[in-house]
Structure formats: structure tokens, C-alpha cells
Image: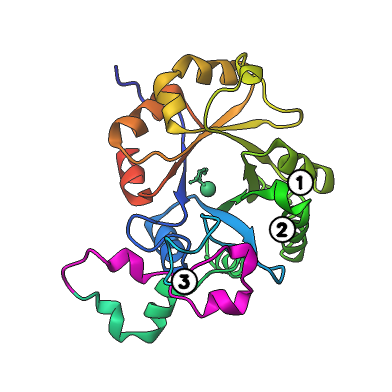
Amino acid sequence: MTHATPRTIQVVAHRGASEDAPEHTLAAYRRAIEDGADALECDVRLTADGHLVLVHDRRVNRTSNGRGAVSALELADLAALDFGSWKDRDRDEAPDWDTDPERLSERTSVLTLERLLELVADAGRPVELAIETKHPTRWAGQVEERLLFLLKRFGLDAPPAEGPHPVRVMSFSARSLHRVRAAAPTVPVVYLMQFISPRMRDGRLPAGVRIAGPGMRIVRNHPAFIRKLQAAGHSVHVWTVNEPEDVQLCADLGVEAIITNRPRQVLSQLGR
Ligand code: G3P
Ligand code: CA
């Protein structure tokens, strides 16, 4: 049964508009902003010399022409790699940005969190950020420390004068979220879930967490669990929602945010 969408669902571009452009590149985030995404999602990892860069996997092998763990490489090592060409591997025609050095660089350069924060600050309209800490337990708080340092520098560690907080921190690690809350209690945090752990079965999240981030598989297979989260007063942000029937299910359930590789298509399906 199809219900009317009760209110605006936030559309979050997962790793940027990552279906159209290489994930986590400036090109993907610019495209998401042009497409009208309400928010941008990114994964942050710490380099060997302490910078936060946007790379999903532990290693750079899948998304660049290099090899090795992000944590073993310095920012200068990553800056020398090509993070975009893997996306063009299966294309028949030569991409037109080949001839435009600036566009090429935006598609191929590693992106720091700092640069993404600058992009959002200059977006010309409100764009929120959903930042996921990757493998934070290994680094004994360094990921969160650097993240909060940057948020503070951009004036994003405290609540805005009006409207919702423009940044939230997401993690599969309750410990990481706890660290963020301890240092910046007003920054919203999202507890990501790949499966329903026995402790969460009644719809309760770790202490202090108000937003649940279930994977689409949970939503599809256990909609009753989503209703339990909602009954417990939690907002629900679902990842990664790319198929029209999944978008519709999320809308029917009344979730607050849809995280997608296809922001333009999802916005259009939601009538925006
Ligand atoms: O937004 C949450 C989602 O991105 C978590 O999964 O593997 O894409 O980082 P992953
Ligand atoms: Ca992520």
C-alpha cells in the first residue's frame, strides 16, 4: 500500500553523488550539491601524519591506483594517487573532463575533511554533513579528536543560532559516539546498525544516542523493529537506499533521512 509522504525526508548523498562520480571526490560532492541533496555523507580515516581523509575502505586499493592502508600513508602519498579513474574503467567513450585539468583533478584527487567543510561553507545554501568515523577504536580517540578540532575551527561544534545542527557524527562504534558526545554534547550522533543486536531488540539505543542508522536490509526485513525505534522516540536515518521500492518503503515508514548514492533520483521520486 502506498501512503502519502507525511513530511520532508532528508536526502543524504552517500559518499557524494557516488553513482555519477567517483565516491568521496570533490566532483561527487559538487554534483550532490547541484542535485539538491540536503546533506552529504562521508567516511573519515586518519592518515599516518594525522589528517582526516575521505576514504571508505581500510586500504586504498579499490578506489585508487595505489596500494596499502590509509593509516600507513601520509597525506602527500595519497595526494599523488588517482582516486577517480577506477570509476571510468568500464566506460566505452573517453570522458570529456580528460581535457579539463581542473575537472580532472576534482574527480581524481583524495579529499580531506577540511576541504569538504570548506565546500559546504561555500555552498550558497544550507547543506548538512553526516560524518562517519571509520575504525575509530583502533586509534584510541585520535579520529574523534581531529574531527572535533576541525568542527571547532569551522564553528560547527556548538549549536547554531537557529535551525538544526548542520553536522552529525555517525558510527558503528558506540564508543566513538560516546567520545564525540563527551567532547561536544550538542553535536547529534547516529548509531549505525548492520544487524539487530540482542540488546537493541526493544528499540533502545546506546545511552545518549537519539538517532538510529539501520541498513536498508534491516528496514526491509524487520519493519517492526523500525517502528519500535520510532516508538522509543528515535529518529531513523537509513542507508544505503538506491532502489525506488526501498525509497517508498522508507517513506511509508516515515523515516527522517534516506542516505543514497542517487540523490537526484530519490529527490525526484519524493516529488522534490
Ligand atoms: O551512512 C552509513 C553507511 O555509509 C554505512 O556503511 O559501509 O557505506 O560506510 P558504509
Ligand atoms: Ca559510510
Above or below: residue 246 compared with residue 114: above
Q: Which mark is residue 180?
A: 1
Instruction: Specify whether 180 is left or right of 17.
Output: right
Looking at the image, can residue 5 be seen?
Answer: no
Where is residue 121? Give x, y as percent. Answer: 60, 65
Residue furthest out toward the left:
92
- Eye-nearest disc, 3 or 1: 3
Q: Could you tell which of marks 2 and 3 lies nearer the N-terminus?
A: 3
Residue furthest out toward the right:
182
Q: Secondary structure at mark 1?
A: helix
Where is residue 234? Give x, y as percent. Answer: 62, 25
Instruction: Specify whether 114 is left or right of 93.
Output: right
Q: Could you tell which of marks 2 and 1 lies nearer the N-terminus?
A: 2
Q: What type is the residue that disc 3 sits on? A: Gly
Quarter of the image for the N terminus: give it: top left
Where is residue 136? Give x, y as percent. Answer: 69, 49
Q: What type is the residue that disc 2 sits on? A: Leu
Above or below: residue 69 compared with residue 269: below
Q: Gap in Å between the C-alphas at discs 2 and 3?
A: 25 Å
Instruction: Specify whether 257 is left or right of 192.
Output: left
Residue at 21%, 76% in the rendered image: 94
User: Where does label 3 land, which residue?
Assistant: 66
Q: Which mark is residue 147?
A: 2
Quarter of the image for the C terminus: give it: top left
Residue at 83%, 48% in the rendered image: 183
